[in-house]
Image (tube, rainbow, N blue to C red):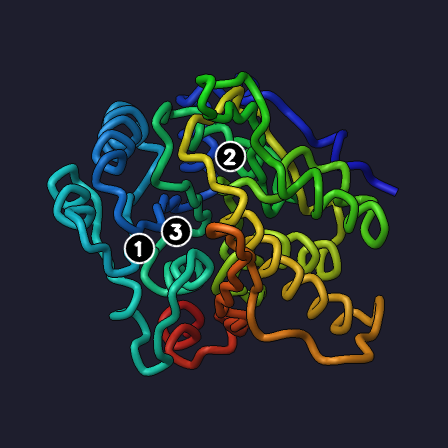
Amino acid sequence: MSDILNKTWHHSKFSNISRLVTLKEKKQLKISLAFPTLNEEATIGKEILIIRTELAERYPLLDEIAIIDSSSRDNTRRVAQEFGAKVFTSKSILSKYGSFRGKGENLWKSLFVLEGDLIVWVDADISNIAPKFVYGLIGPLLEDDRTAYVKAFYERPIRSTGGISASGGGRVTEILVRPLFSLFYPELARLVQPLSGEYAGRRDLLERLPFSVGYGVELGHLIDILELDGIEALAQVDLDMRIHRNQTTEALGKMSYGILHTFFARMEQYKKSKLLTGLGDRHIALRAEDAKHLVTKTEISAVERPPMIEIPEYRAKFHR
């Protein structure tokens, strides 16, 4: 059995950007970068500026930089446009198919508007953004035609009342996802950060994947890729450190709920297990107020977008 640890590298292996550009041109590939955004005016301008300056202007590695925005209420779209990115609003893409709130929805719709053969997705809340967040993910795809999907991993400092600790992020991975993978998909348990928000893939793979519109999109991708193409399609790259907003425990609970929805759906789809009862339709949280515990119920979307290759408009555009 192949081991993902044999395709695990440090970003410095791909730091010769001129070489990456040569490989891209030799293979006649286009590369697109997209940021899924929601109220990211504080960080998106810096991210676009640094990446565009180094990887589009100094080195022509990227052919386009775009944001796919979930109707931000701040100045995210204006800032992104001023710093040179293409700007798309998620709800206006393939509007006949409706619109849902969630990162997975933005990623799915980005496949329709982006032009690249290789697509890189980077979160828009990274305060220590650097070119390595992009070239580190592109490098394995350019160097090895068998690699189809590359995940990032990194140290994740966590903020608390005592300041910033050097590590502590990735709580949902270690408490929920790694135990699940250890039980059902031990090959995937060797991914350092299966839920990382930065990854890149080949269009001809991405268009065959369903997309959970919400929190389960990363886990769903990994299981589907393993089932479709095997562990050989995956690689992972160490980007050193990522500094971003840390989620509250309540938010992580909602994230775990969405991930479990996707996980159970995949277990039934691939006949790994069978549910004998229906799943609850709300995430339930308890909030202490005075001497009472109050119940809060939140609907978390479990919608799955179909593989983009099944959408007629997409086939007409990319598969004439």
Q: Quadrant of residue 90?
A: bottom left
The residue pinned by badge 3 equals 116
Task: Give the class, few, some or many, for how many residues have Cα within 10 Å of label 1's Cα (few <14, many ≥20).
Answer: many
Q: CA distance from mark 3 to mark 2?
A: 14 Å
Q: CA distance from mark 2 to mark 1?
A: 19 Å
Task: Give the class, few, some or many, for how many residues have Cα within 10 Å of label 3's Cα (few <14, many ≥20).
Answer: some
The residue pinned by badge 2 equals 137
The answer to whether residue 300 is visible is: no
Residue drawn at x 27%, y 26% is 50
When the figure is inspected, residue 27 is found, relative to residue 115, above or below; the finding is above
Residue 315 in percent (x, y) is at: 43, 75
Residue 154 in percent (x, y) is at: 56, 26
Residue drawn at x 32%, y 61% is 113
Looking at the image, is mark 3 or mark 2 nearer the viewer? 2
When the figure is inspected, residue 148 is found, relative to residue 71, above or below; the finding is above
Residue drawn at x 61%, y 53% is 256
The answer to whether residue 287 is visible is: yes
Q: Quadrant of residue 320?
A: bottom left
Q: Secondary structure at mark 2?
A: helix
The residue pinned by badge 1 equals 68
Please tell me which of labels 2 and 1 falls first in the chain. 1
Q: Secondary structure at mark 3?
A: loop
Look at the numbered discs 1 and 3 and tell me whether their residues touch, using CB distance below 8 Å.
Answer: no
Please tell me which of labels 3 and 2 falls first in the chain. 3
Front residue (pair 55, 25): 55
Look at the numbered discs 2 and 1 and tell me whether their residues touch, using CB distance below 8 Å.
Answer: no
Q: Amino acid at mark 3?
A: Gly
